[in-house]
Amino acid sequence: MNESGINLATRGADTILPPGRLEELLESGRRLRVKLGLDPTAPMVTLGWAVVLRKLRHFQELGHTAVLIVGDFTARVGDPSGKSETRKRLTAEEVKAHAEPLLEQFRQVLLPEPLEIRWNSEWLESLDMTEILELTTTVTVAQMLERSDFANRYSEGNPISITEFLYPLLQGYDSVAVRADVELGGSDQLWNLMMGRNIQTRYGQEPQVALTMPLLTGTDGRNKMSQSLGNYIGVTEPASEMFGKTMSIPDHLLGEWFRLAADRPAGEVDAILEGVETGSRHPAQAKRLLARRIVSLYRGEGEADAAEEDFDRRFKYRRVPEDAPPFALPAGDPVYLPGLLRSAKLVASASEARRLIDAGAVRVDGASVGGYEVERQVLLDRVLTVGKRRSVFLN
RNA sequence: GCCGGGAUACCCAAGCGGCCAAAGGGAGCAGACUGUAAAUCUGCCGGCGAAGCCUUCGGAGGUUCAAAUCCUUCUCCCGGCACCA
């Protein structure tokens, strides 16, 4: 194993425990089994999830086996990590609805091989009470309560269910089931990953290395990226969306995003940041580069170029977008615009449409519309936009 | 189990018989300025082919010309006490 292999494996990592062990494993020349468990709690892979997925991919690139565990069973238990209250438990149906689309997206980030995809219901569903009791002997209540999330909740008198105590045990058992050498996770997963080590030891296995990645901050620049907060970019989003959303992130996220979202090596990131700091590189230019890198990763360079051109047309030169999806202009003349905007799904309600028309935000081929009634002539084969981001081509 | 406090729009939070589609803040959307950054400023922020009407203030029922506001009841949350240990 050469130096650069270790660099790739550890690039961007937050914590790697125990110290030195990962290097040993990498140098051993053995093909490692690298585990990443993701609970299908939401239907989309965001750039946040992609951070750990890309880390897994790094190991694939080094020839190691990616063992991706779909936590279909654990999603029904509810991970307490980082939570100030009990996490919602998903039903088997919800899990199933999420899992299929997720698999496809996982494959989009990872290499086709070496890849092993496992569902943890495979071994967790059939655990009997004897084995569960066995599992529970590996931790004490005091150890559980050391975790900051539990500690806070306990001291504030908030409820902690026994189910939540079980979660890290089950996740640890996953490591036993797949014989993991390394387990990856977000930095909020460190405790769970360390529990995996305890449990592996209990089952006579060599304990895994725990490698955590920082949690990616969302497009709002404040909270970690999550689907429930709406501050995310999905890996399946169209190139122009990805590009535009990236351009809208606050400047202070540049370094973090270059490193984690665009997956660039530290040296390159430092050079760019230095350029921005010394004024030799404009922040907006750096962000363009970032956006192009991210889009290239998931859509390819061709689409990245096209997305940038589209971005310029739309926002820099304020021209009408070329990729506006078509929408069939309904019969009738004149056209009742609020109704049209609603049925074209550019707005949620006709009331909202009226307000936006009043505010001058609704345009036909770039020209503001004054009233609610518009002649058919004026709309046919034109691009209708609401603000800068929403548009349709009427035909 | 008992006593007390509470539940208001996406979130926080005022209102406590008519002037309430409901103050204020945050988030969000649109506009100005920019670099779709930050900061700042302006407007909007339940629905409806809309001077009017309809639906909303935890659920159900009631009082009243009139209820987010008063009464009854139910559900859930918070504090204290008791029970248990």
Image (cartoon, rainbow, N blue to C red):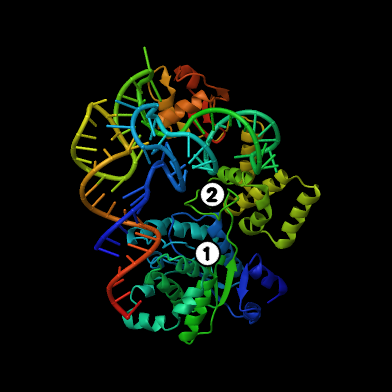
Q: Secondary structure at mark 2?
A: loop
- Give whichever of A225, A137 is nearer the camera: A137
In the rendered structure, the residue with mark 2 lies on which chain? A
Q: Is residue A65 visible?
A: yes
Q: Nearer the viewer, residue B40 or B38?
A: B40
- A221 on left or right of A162: right
Residue occupying the point 49% across, 70% down: A151
The x, y position of residue A358, in whole percent, is 50, 23
- The Cα–Cα distance between marks 2 and 1, rounded to whole angstroms, is 29 Å
Image-quadrant location for residue A344: top left
For disc 1, the chain is A
Image: A390 above or below A41: above
**Residue A117 can be seen, yes or no:** no
Residue that mark 2 sits on: A231
**From the viewer's perspective, is B5 left or right of A384?**
left
Label number found at residue A112: 1
Q: Find residue A50 and report its horizontal and vertical position in percent.
A: 55, 59
Quadrant position of the N terminus of chain A in the picture: bottom right
What kind of residue is marked 1?
Pro
Q: Nearer the viewer, mark 2 or mark 1?
A: 2
Local crowd size for mark 1, using a 10 Å CA cut-off: few (<14), some (14–19), many (≥20) = few
Label 2: few (<14), some (14–19) or many (≥20) C-alpha neighbours in 10 Å: some
Q: Position of residue A259 (x, y in %)?
A: 66, 59
Compared across the picture, whether A133 is left or right of B45 comes to left
Look at the numbered disc 1 and give the secondary structure of its residue.
loop
Relative depth, front residue between B61 and B70:
B70
Which mark sits nearer the N-terminus, 2 or 1? 1
Q: At 52% from the left edge and 80% from the top edge, which residue is drawn?
A: A197
| Residue type indicated by callout 2 | Asn
Give the residue furthest to the bottom: A204
Picture coordinates of residue A390, whole percent (x, y): 52, 35
Q: Residue at x 49, y 32 (%)?
A: A392
